[in-house]
Amino acid sequence: MGKGRYFLERLADGAELSGEPMPGQPVVEIAGDRRVLVENHRGILEYSRERIGIKVKYGVVAVCGCGLEVIRMTREQLVISGRIDGISIQRRG
């Protein structure tokens, strides 16, 4: 972990902002069981109708379900639709 990141995390904790994402951190929003928005992604690592793996700063966010598809993808945001059964986070290292 870089010194700058550690400092920003401590600063956020001290200011009681730990619930707010830090700049550049991935944000995952779930809309019911049909849509997922991932902000600050770094691309798609795995893509099938049952599982989509999204690279993020600290690892992979995996969305599992049925009939999954990426309906919008920009440099900042990725939107997945289909029946969402689960979302997991796999950290590097």
Image (spheres, rainbow, N blue to C red):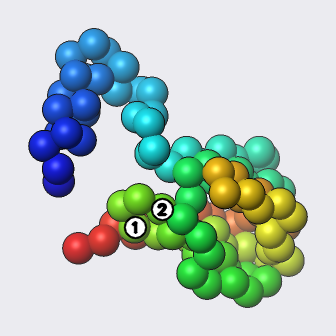
Which one is in front, 29 or 12?
A: 12
Residue 73: quadrant of the picture: bottom right
**Residue 88 visible (yes or no):** no
Q: CA distance from mark 2 to mark 1?
A: 5 Å
* Circle 1 Cα neighbour tier, 10 Å, few/some/many (<14 / 14–19 / ≥20): some
For disc 1, the marked residue is: 59
**Residue 85 visible (yes or no):** yes
Residue 11: % across, % down? 22, 22
- The three-letter amino acid code for the residue at tag 1 is Gly
- The three-letter amino acid code for the residue at tag 2 is Val
Q: Any mark on residue 56, and which?
A: 2
Residue 1: % across, % down? 17, 53
Badge 2 marks a residue whose secondary structure is strand
- Residue at image coords 34%, 66%: 91
- Residue at image coords 45%, 44%: 24
Badge 1 marks a residue whose secondary structure is strand
With 86 as the anchor, is 48 left or right in this view?
right
- Residue at image coords 85%, 77%: 67
Q: Any mark on residue 32, and which?
A: none
Residue lying farthest left?
3
Residue 13: % across, % down? 25, 23
- Residue at image coords 51%, 69%: 55
Residue 46: quadrant of the picture: bottom right
Disc 2 vs disc 1: Cβ atoms closer than 8 Å? yes
With 72 as the anchor, is 91 left or right in this view?
left
Residue lying farthest top?
15
Work out which quarter of the rendered image holds the C terminus and state it: bottom left
Residue 37: % across, % down? 70, 51
* Circle 2 Cα neighbour tier, 10 Å, few/some/many (<14 / 14–19 / ≥20): many
Q: Is residue 82 above or below residue 9?
A: below
Q: Is residue 14 above or below residue 4?
A: above
